Image: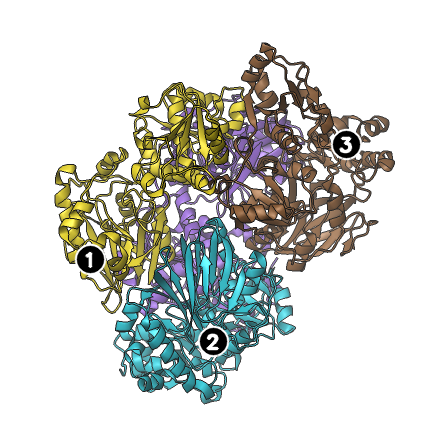
Chain colours: A purple, B yellow, C brown, D cyan
């Protein structure tokens, strides 16, 4: 018997391979699907089924490619949608994988046709439930994505899926969700790779709302929807083919790199915020690789080829992160990073940085400045507010950019400094030039003597 | 500056990546071309050119796939042939790769339009010549492949290519050939990963034949042509596409495996000769993985899917060897090898083995038996002949099988025992049942007290 | 937060790395401990604590080496024993690892001072309990190892540990045990990588024995004790040092290999049973790599150097399996396996094999023969008995060898054929020469028409 | 036959593994010697000999550890020195490795007892000469290291070694040297992984000095000697043991990191110059990983533990570079790099950067500033001098630091900007605060319109 949870970092997405007696099933494969073949075959299993929990919206699913390579049978959820491939799973359907049994349980709410899958052991006893984006450790899946007009209906469905279906399972059943902490699919997901029905029943805050009205009122609300979700939703109904290959963009000398920029390519700098601060290609967007999956879909365009500035000429993991959310048109990577750029005598830009203590001192000095806090409102409320700061959530910065004054020195502020550099790069590309990023952000702020409103 | 020789074991094929200042060239890439991208990008080079030395006949070249993935420009040789892709190289054409220069030198003979490539260093001085299948360490390329009717013409061309072109280079030039020892493209290739013009001028036996007539007489002869060469020649003119993916055949349980056999799949057992001897799937062909590249093209069909029996469920290196010579239709690998076959109660066959000393003793006892020596005649002549053995070269065994008596105990014999098991499996599949393979073969024979004719 | 279960295959041993906020803990590290450093550091954690659940008896623990390399603090269990290193854990002691808490719970029974460790999440709530060899999925740890004279006392302790301590935890707590299915530390461990308190409470057969007397009667029994356990118990109290390096035995040519045999080295052949059957070095013991961890400690000596016959010159995984149970004196690996042995003209032995159907036919024919079933009695009872077979458990074969007649043809029989070859090699080395191994064993037997007593 | 050149990047050191028929030899192994065992065993070779070309001074040789792990016999050169291990090679001694022969040739000059090794092929013909630090592609080994008082004597010895011994070999012999371009053991080594006797005879500038006096005058000069050479020379006579383990420093949270700083640890920041510029731990030395091997031995102390700031928590390749030159006392790596430092609210420093065009504009503006060119004099002469720059070679900066004015804005300048940041960090740690590093350095300078003296 074989069990493997495969995490796509950044997306905090969990997919699963379960194998027994020569057969395996994969649940919610990611786009770069070779990892499943490698794991299953190494352990001696033929992939028999691919099960989807729902029409995913935050990444490109790899079902079709995986099926074409392996001959596996795909069962997708969300039967009513316009799928171009394979069969839809039905409520109660059972799948045999070696001596194991998996039963499909309709758990709508996150999408109209979401499914959970209950794995039974060799003796036919329920053991693990794969809950997709219905139930997470510490949270439940958001219900606003199918459309604001049916949000209440979805919240009610989610209520029934959880209270009437999943919570009808016994406390000892293990829960393997579709996402871990850090996913945009749930804002309060706990840092737990797996949980149990009993743990969630007791401690999951949303599951304490046993009254339907309370639950619907709390869960049935709108959250931010990254613009790339639309693209994912569209792609995940289509029949991709395995031709759809993993990109291997070449290293490019500065001359070629610049020429492609002039032809319209967008430049993404994934180095950390300090390297970007010191010197970067004018016009480039900064999104550090550690937060790339969360923000690429907000600030990059699917319509223009991508050029990368990175710490390596073969940034495979970064390319994988982009590929998983549909950015597969990558023209190249700047050879030797900024070193070759500077050695070619090209122009570069920099952005000032300041550590929190120096900023506090500056505030005390009474110098005129503006702190632009680009954290979302709920994070500000939970973690602390900087007095006199202007708050614009980073995702709204492009459209609300005019609220930021051009003649004042702007200190961009977030939780740690990572997101601030995204904001600063957006402002810089819009012509702002009195920009400083606050290194350490709120975390540093709290360690010092600076004032804070809690 | 970057230089890497990449060997495809089994084929004893050498391909090369040379890089400088952000640009790289690949010479004669193999079909599974990702290795070149990985090596070049890791070192910071964009692949700019792909150079072919000739229309290869012993493996599927990876130029088109590599070009599609990288944007590199392909230059093929053999301009007159019916190529479906890219440009033909011309004699004297120069390629710039960073600060290096590569000059094309027409060296026909192995094929009508073969080329060598002379690499010059940063100061423009000749440094390394890539000779493809024109000149090897210790041998020259065979000239019989373009057709027996033009063999003399090709031998003359080869003479001119070597004596008038390559040997006009200075002694100190390094020679990087297209094959090493073990290739079917030259029977006497020395065990040297690289050599020099001077070393070959002095010691290469064929290059001592400075008189044209002597050279043509010696070199202009027919050799065996593995049947798969025709397939390679045909494929290497075509425009493959990167869709042409590397196979990932699933592990199969015995029932499924047997069902595919009944539908017409051929079974290839790549375990070593001893494992096959002890027990194997009835009807399977034995070719040990260590000699797979040399013999698969003789005994497997391109028209039937392949099933594998191997020591692992994911025999990637074996699949690569098959893929490189066009066997990409692999339906599966027997799960857990013969263990699952036997545990399912299925029938199996075995073949007797004997070590050389026991065979010698048997011979002394006067028992009636036949030694079938399946080595080629030239190998027998060079290394020693077994008295009273019947000689049929393994490659001719299928068509000359009726020369082997059915009622005598047959001892199959070769240099070490590896090829003998191929022969025994062919005989067994043709209904022979008194078969014994001689373990250790001639090598063991010579270590003992058995009689031999030298 | 980081959680990783690391399995040592063969031993079916599970060790664990748990990390949070820069700190990590390792539970029951194996001897080749670099894997923990690699995993922890890659994820950004310094290993702070090493926790042992008990003085292990089935493998060499890697605590001291890991501590010396990392500066981690070791807490061993079994305080009363003569430990030469570090501190003993105390009941109720709490360990902080980042924002997580781990609490030690004394759960004696398997050893007098066994411990379990209860991991609490960031909010201080119990989440996962690491139960070592106290509680497994589907079984409880054996209690006979501390000594037959205190077996009842230990069974009572185990009863209290389980019913009063572990089962006082809530159903929803996840259970991560020290072993999975296949370990000699529990005969009925289920094929589950993890379980929960609730699942065990409901389904674990031993946990249904809620009456103390019933439990003690059932659990307080003697099992086989592999002889190597004594060695492990002794080593696991000592202070090893990191000098204790992982072996890298060289490939050896047959002449050197044979010379070392003559100097007293023992030869272990880890190829599968079919390869061994066909030809092996005279005097070698056959233990296929897939069952090596289970049987090496029964049939190899710690006092003589080891020589290996394997399918590869660098059988790292096999060396790791031996190293983990203290066999670190490995002099070499036969170069090119049996091929070089035979090519050197050396003598070899073979053992006949038969598939089950042929054996059944033979039985029907009335030929005189003996089936030697080397499965343990409980396995025979559970799975089926072969009529007229003589039963000697493989582990008792050396001392009961005289019960096997020398002049009858002996068919060695087990579940699948793998263990049979161990038995056949032991008999062959004792001079038996009419030996045949039954391929497929009971599994094959059941698939056919052969008679069986259930 | 097996041939592998293994490069230690940074040191541009080449070691070699040559194998044949089960036996292998390693020439000049590096300290982390496992790579040789892996390569040799994978290919089926037992390492029989370890040959040293001389008592190395630029890295710690791995002979003793490799010998202890493999049983190989070491032959060191420089017989007169105070070696604590194994045998000294003698002139003319022959070593058999399978069917190959290697002959030792005394080629003193770089050290008093340097040796070259001439590899003969299977037919006994000279093929490849391993020249250690006697002859490189494009240069000869320096002769000043044995002592300035015997420099002329060594230069004469080098003359004889090259002209009377190596050049007595034929042009076609391949030359495999001990270093490639970038090594401090020869300033003009060409970018060639291998060369030939003929190529060097014709083109090596030093080999054109056929007159002994000219050669001695040119070669017998003093070069810079990095201070760490003394340490290497001392270590390379000693008998290390395999206990001498590869460091695995843990990730450290800022608090622990800072505590170790206060106890006297030195901080090395190996991130690229831009990341360091933006923010770094006060007091840290900047040496970018790409030039670490060349400069660590100049600016780090062997007497204080090291702390690292890097882009990863497990910077294995960086640790290897340090380990190879004896820096094995590494206490830890800053967890999450500067991010965790800032999030803990700690103070950091930054250094201004400027691109070349902006600097040129500034120069035109007449602002008072000083360009500190830290390139060596010969590099300045070859590549171009910046008007009015003050030149202090980076290696002399610590002792000549008082020549740098404290009240002027100092622009640190080198070839590309990489070395400049080392200089700037040294100045910053000495209290200088008006520092700017010129990104792109001379390379960028030449691309623009800035003035230069050639």
Q: Nearer the viewer, mark 2 or mark 3?
A: 2
Q: From where the camera sits, is residue A311 visible?
A: no
Q: Nearer the viewer, residue D130 or B124?
A: D130
Q: Mark 1 sits on what residue? A: B166
Q: Nearer the viewer, mark 1 or mark 3?
A: 1
Q: Mark 2 sits on what residue? A: D113
Chain identity of mark 3: C
- Badge 3 marks a residue whose secondary structure is loop
Tell me if mark 1 has few (under 14), some (14-19) or many (20+) residues whose alpha carbon lies within 10 angstroms of its own: many
Q: From where the camera sits, is residue A384 visible?
A: yes
Residue D108 in the image, given as x and y percentages of width and height: 43, 77
| Image position of B272 (left or right of D329) | left
Could you tell me which quadrant the C terminus of chain D lies in?
Answer: bottom left
Residues under labels 1 and 3: Cα distance?
A: 76 Å
Q: Mark 3 sits on what residue? A: C223
Chain identity of mark 1: B
Share a chain, discs 1 and 3? no
| Image position of C382 (left or right of B407) | right
Residue C236 in the image, given as x and y percentages of width and height: 74, 49
Residue D447 in the image, given as x and y percentages of width and height: 27, 72
- Badge 2 marks a residue whose secondary structure is loop
Number of disc labels: 3
Residue D293 in the image, given as x and y percentages of width and height: 47, 69
| Image position of B93 (left or right of B309) | left
Q: Nearer the viewer, residue B382 or C295?
A: B382
User: Quick check: marks 2 and 1 in contact, CB under 8 Å?
Assistant: no
Chain identity of mark 2: D
Identify the image quadrant of residue B452.
Answer: top left
Q: Nearer the viewer, residue B307 or B273?
A: B273
Tell me if mark 3 has few (under 14), some (14-19) or many (20+) residues whose alpha carbon lies within 10 angstroms of its own: some
- Badge 1 marks a residue whose secondary structure is helix
Share a chain, discs 2 and 3? no
């Amino acid at each position: 018997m074989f069990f493997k949870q495969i995490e796509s970092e950044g997306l905090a997405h969990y997919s699963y391979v379960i194998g027994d007696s020569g057969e395996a099933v994969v649940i919610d494969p990611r786009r770069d699907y070779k990892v499943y073949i490698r794991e299953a075959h190494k352990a001696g299993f033929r992939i028999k089924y691919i099960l989807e929990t729902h029409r995913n919206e935050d990444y490109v699913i790899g079902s079709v490619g995986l099926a074409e390579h392996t001959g596996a049978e795909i069962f997708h959820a969300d039967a009513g949608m316009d799928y171009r491939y394979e069969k839809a799973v039905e409520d109660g359907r059972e799948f045999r994988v070696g001596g194991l049994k998996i039963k499909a349980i309709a758990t709508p709410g996150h999408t109209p046709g979401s499914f959970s899958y209950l794995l039974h052991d060799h003796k036919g006893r329920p053991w693990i439930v794969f809950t997709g984006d219905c139930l997470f450790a510490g949270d439940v899946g958001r219900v606003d994505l199918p459309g604001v007009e049916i949000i209440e209906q979805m919240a009610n469905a989610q209520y029934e899926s959880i209270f009437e279906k999943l919570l009808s399972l016994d406390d000892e059943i293990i829960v393997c969700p579709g996402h871990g902490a850090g996913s945009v699919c749930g804002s309060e997901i706990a840092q737990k790779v797996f949980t149990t029905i009993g743990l969630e029943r007791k401690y999951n805050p949303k599951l304490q709302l046993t009254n339907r009205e309370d639950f619907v009122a709390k869960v049935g609300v709108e959250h931010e929807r990254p613009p790339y979700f639309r693209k994912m939703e569209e792609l995940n109904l289509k029949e991709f083919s395995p031709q759809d290959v993993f990109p291997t963009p070449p290293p490019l000398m500065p001359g070629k790199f610049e020429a492609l920029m002039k032809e319209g390519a967008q430049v993404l700098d994934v180095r950390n915020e300090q390297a970007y601060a010191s010197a970067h290609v004018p016009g480039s967007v900064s999104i550090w690789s550690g937060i790339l999956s969360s923000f690429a879909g907000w600030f990059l365009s699917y319509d223009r080829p991508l050029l990368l500035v990175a710490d390596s000429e073969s940034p495979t993991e970064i390319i994988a992160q982009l590929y998983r959310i549909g950015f597969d048109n990558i023209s190249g990577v700047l050879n030797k990073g900024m070193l070759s750029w500077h050695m070619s005598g090209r122009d570069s830009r920099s952005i000032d940085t300041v550590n929190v203590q120096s900023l506090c001192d500056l505030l005390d000095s009474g110098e005129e400045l503006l702190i632009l806090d680009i954290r979302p409102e709920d994070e500000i409320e939970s973690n602390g507010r900087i007095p006199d700061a202007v708050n614009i959530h980073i995702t709204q910065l492009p459209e609300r950019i005019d609220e930021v004054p051009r003649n004042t020195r702007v200190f961009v502020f977030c939780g740690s400094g990572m997101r601030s550099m995204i904001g600063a790069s957006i402002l810089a590309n819009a012509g702002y030039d009195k920009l400083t990023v606050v290194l350490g952000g709120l975390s540093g702020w709290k360690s010092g003597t600076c004032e804070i409103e809690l």
